Image: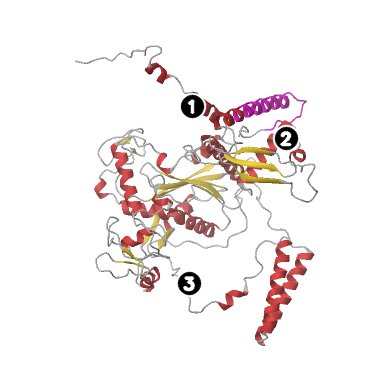
Amino acid sequence: MTETTTLIEPRPGSRAARVALPRAIDALKQLATEYGVCARPVLLRRTDLATGQTEVIDLPCGATRDDKCPACAKRAKRLRQVQIREGWHRTDEPTTGPEPATDAQRALIELRANYELGRAQAELSSQWDQVADLEQAIAEVEEVIAAEGLRGRIAPPHQADYQDEDGPARRTRSTRRRQDVPDLPRRRVEPRTVGRVYAAPDGATYQPSMWLTLTLGSYGAVHGVRRAPSGKPIPCACRRVHTDDDPLIGTPVDPARYDYRRAAWDAVHFPRLLDRFWQNLRRAEGWNIQYAGCVEPQRRLAPHAHFAIRGTIPRTLLAKVARATYHQVWWPPVDRRTCEPDNPPAWNADRGAWVDPDTGRPLPTWSEALDTLDDSDTEPAHVIAFGDQVKAKGVNAGSRDTDRTIGYITKYLTKSAADCHAETTDAQRAHADRLWRQLRVTPCSDRCANWLLYGVQPKNAHGKLRPGNCKGKVHQRSTLGIGGRRILISRDWSGKTLADHRADAHAWVKALLGISTDAATADPVDATPGEPAPVAWEIARPDDPDVPPVEHRLLRAVAQRVQRRQQLDAARQRASTGPPGTAVPGGGDTHG
């Protein structure tokens, strides 16, 4: 017998009716998010030193995640999309290279060269008083060189000549390639960043780019959607046919056989593998390939990367470079743990070292543990490589694929790694918990406290280390081991930093509204030309007497954003109805 439940409206004036009413503060925050107002601004107090007048200014917090500040996260995501779009299909070089040195700069370098020769001759003749005087002169001329606008250090300091010869030597490892990976061609890298230009039979030219996805290997069978080459669904490893929205997708078919240890190590060292891939690809292709992409977890919670590549590269070469790319982790052996987090080694304050909990003997230091790796037969602690799935696709400038791919690359940019895929079932939560428990005991660096679980004292060990509770980012539940940067942009992608792109957006808004940049940045009247304005800045506290309540500040910010949006809409309307030939500015959301 089935019972039907009828929803009864709460009695007007009752507690249930009052609870169902929307909260005013929630409505204000939602409105602030809609207009791009930061929900948790940084308070700064600006004091005019000439008049003594103070003003409290709200600065956006600059968060990049929705769970912290949706408005700032949306603004950051939009800025990254602009950066990717501007650098993807460039037909010219983003940077022209450094300018030649001026005559004054060249004269300073000649003077520095004379001082260097004089110091070498004085040192050869053991005239140490002259060596000291020349070192002081060298330091002075290098300060002048830096003030003249030359970038970088002209030469290393001479103090390195007097380092203790008995100090620890820098360890080097063999660069010989492994025998189980294919060899790669090596070409001289040309100083160009734009791709090849193709000519059509009708004489038209086009310069396409690419989109690339790199994935790690398998750690065990997982539930997934399988399709035959004809597109017909086929059973999964569990002998079932899954749909795209099946919550089992990505979870292991047999959790007991799933290699969580290797999955954790691969996630921790995935950024280094990506660096090796781009180094190998540039050397094999022979030009300075530029990329922009992001790292995000798959449904199985393993990291993979999507990249927009400027120019085109043969798909066979991409697959070959992915198969030949690997990263070796030369750390002490981690075959088994000598203790568990609930029974860790003890810190001996008298010896200043960690000791075995059973024998009381000091654990090997980090340097001593690395000494065991000097044997030529020693294998690395871990080797990470890509899987067989390498997806590459060509994308033409101005096509619909461009915007769609940029949106796909930045799809999860405002979410933490653990929030990219919702955990709605016990199987999904158990899979994430097992991976997190393995990440908690996986070493993340040479200073990680987890080395104590493997019988080794980490580098610069101290008594506050807590194995199994390292504060590193890769050990957090929200990162799933992805501790590096989520967004990866090569140096010569767009020729601009995020600050430059942000300044371009502000300049576009000012030009649209007819605001003079000189007037907006002019110094106060009382300021002396050539000197900084008499203004002092300091951090304000929310409980300071001159700081209005956060609700008042949100209301003011919302009103300002409404007025600004109305001004922008009016400016766009005037530009669109202007005289013939008037260009209408465009590009991007300017409400941020």
Q: Say which label, 3 or 1, has the lower sequence index.
A: 1
Q: Name the residue under label 2.
A: 511
Residue 386 sits above or below residue 375 on the image? above
Residue pictured at 26% horizontal, 36% vertical? 240
Helix, strand or loop: magenta stretch: helix
Residue 6 seen anywhere in this rendered image of the structure? yes
Residue pictured at 41% horizontal, 39% vertical? 419
Q: Name the residue under label 3.
A: 170
Residue 223 seen anywhere in this rendered image of the structure? no
**Residue 363 position within the rendered picture, expressed as x and y whole percent measured from the top left:** 32, 68
Q: Do tag 1 and tag 2 residues touch (Cβ < 8 Å)?
A: no
Q: What amino acid is labelled 1 in the image? A: Asp
Disc 3 packing (10 Å; few <14; some 14–19; many ≥20): few
Q: Give the range drawn in magenta.
A: 557-585
Disc 2 packing (10 Å; few <14; some 14–19; many ≥20): some
Q: Name the residue under label 1.
A: 26
- Quadrant assignment, res 329: bottom left
Quadrant where the N terminus sits is top left
- Say left or right for 210 vs 340: right
**Residue 36 position within the rendered picture, expressed as x and y whole percent measured from the top left:** 57, 32
Q: What amino acid is labelled 2 in the image? A: Ala
Q: Say which label, 1 or 2, has the lower sequence index.
A: 1
